Amino acid sequence: MAMAAPWSSPPSSSCCAATASTSAPRLLGPGSLKGAAWPAGAGGSSCGGQGMNSRRRLSVRATAAAPPPPVDYADTSATRADADYVASLKVKLLSAVSGLNRGLAASQEDLDRADAAARELEAAGDGPVDLSRDLDRLQGRWRLVYSSAFSSRTLGGSRPGPPTGRLLPITLGQVFQRIDVVSRDFDNIVELELGAPWPLPPVEATATLAHKFEVIGTSGIKIDFEKTTVKTKGSLSQLPPLEVPRIPDNLRPPSNTGSGEFEVTYLDGDTRVTRGDRGELRVFVVA
């Protein structure tokens, strides 16, 4: 009959034995169990998670960083689409007024086309212009690319002014506006070429019409004329500037009050659209 080995352990159904058989032996010296902390209710011979296999569990709390907010790609795409749409309307307006010699060569059909293109751009902007917020955008030098008032064939537009044509040969060059939002200076700068009898060459000059301006309401501008300075160019550039002071109010004709008002209907970093108190549509770009 087979005999069990003297060192073999008697069969046991205890889970503690199974655990001990699979664990590395641990030598405990005298007094090593003194003061050892045991889980409450744990007995030296009990199993089921309350005996020697019980372990004190350490609770580790991990704080996860808050996830970044989701990117609204639809909103980004919509903003980009709106910007592209506005840019296309600016191109449409500039195309409508190109080749019109700043409006001097505009027919009624040209006037209507430019007005319709301007209204599209005004409607597609970021709402009505608010100069209390966007006044700094007026700062700088702007070049006039179109004025519906010049279709009257006078330099005064819808106001009295010298005519352009054979009777008084004045060729209109570039027209600029120089605006300083700090000093409230508002200068209209007009480049002119004045015809002279043969064999004299034409006289080139720059006329600067100095104004002061103030903001009216949300998007309105009022300008008050102060003086005109004429400076010759070319071969006559050595001549001193000629200053024409403001006409006294009591001598001023009723049609020329020396002041004017207009509304800024579209304004961004490089384009400005205004409508005057007599219906003039003007388009400017940064010079």
Image (cartoon, rainbow, N blue to C red):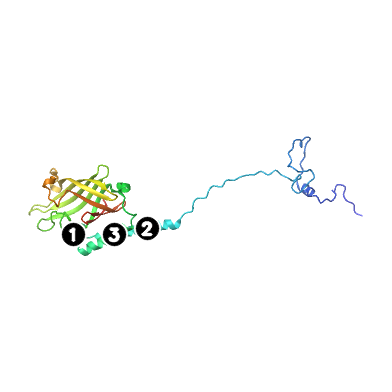
Of discs 2 and 3, which sits in the foreground? 3
Quadrant in the picture for residue 195: bottom left
The residue that label 2 is drawn on is 82
Would you say the residues marked 1 and 2 are in contact, meaning their CB atoms lie under 8 Å apart? no
Q: Is residue 247 above or below residue 98?
A: above
Q: Position of residue 166 (x, y in %)?
A: 10, 58
Task: Provide residue 62's location: percent of width, then percent of height.
Answer: 59, 45
Distance between the alpha carbons at the discs numbered 1 and 2 = 33 Å
Q: Amino acid at mark 3?
A: Arg
* Rendering coords of residue 112 (x, y %): 24, 63
Seen in the picture, residue 75 relative to 66 is either above or below; the reply is below
Marks 2 and 3: CB-CB under 8 Å? no
Contact between marks 3 and 1 (CB within 8 A): the answer is no
Looking at the rendered structure, the kind of residue marked 2 is Asp
Comes first in the chain, label 3 or label 1: 3
Q: Residues within 10 Å of mark 2 (few under 14, many from 20)?
A: some
Q: Is residue 54 left or right of residue 251?
A: right
Q: Which residue is mark 1?
A: 151
Spatial separation of the CA atoms under disc 2 and disc 3: 16 Å
Inspect the image, locate mark 1, and give the three-letter code of the amino acid beneath it: Ser
Which residue, given by chain and number where applicable, does mark 3 sit on? 119
Q: Is residue 86 left or right of residue 159?
A: right
Looking at this view, is 54 or 258 the one in front?
A: 258
Tell me the SS state at disc 1: helix
Disc 3 to disc 1, C-alpha distance: 19 Å
> Quadrant where the N terminus lies?
bottom right
Q: Which is nearer the eye, 66 or 126?
A: 126
Q: Residues within 10 Å of mark 1 (few under 14, many from 20)?
A: many
Which of disc 2 and disc 1 is earlier in sequence?
A: 2
Work out whether 263 lies above or below 30: below
Label whose residue precedes the other's in the sequence (2 or 3): 2
- Please state if 278 lies on the left or on the right of 40 as rendered: left
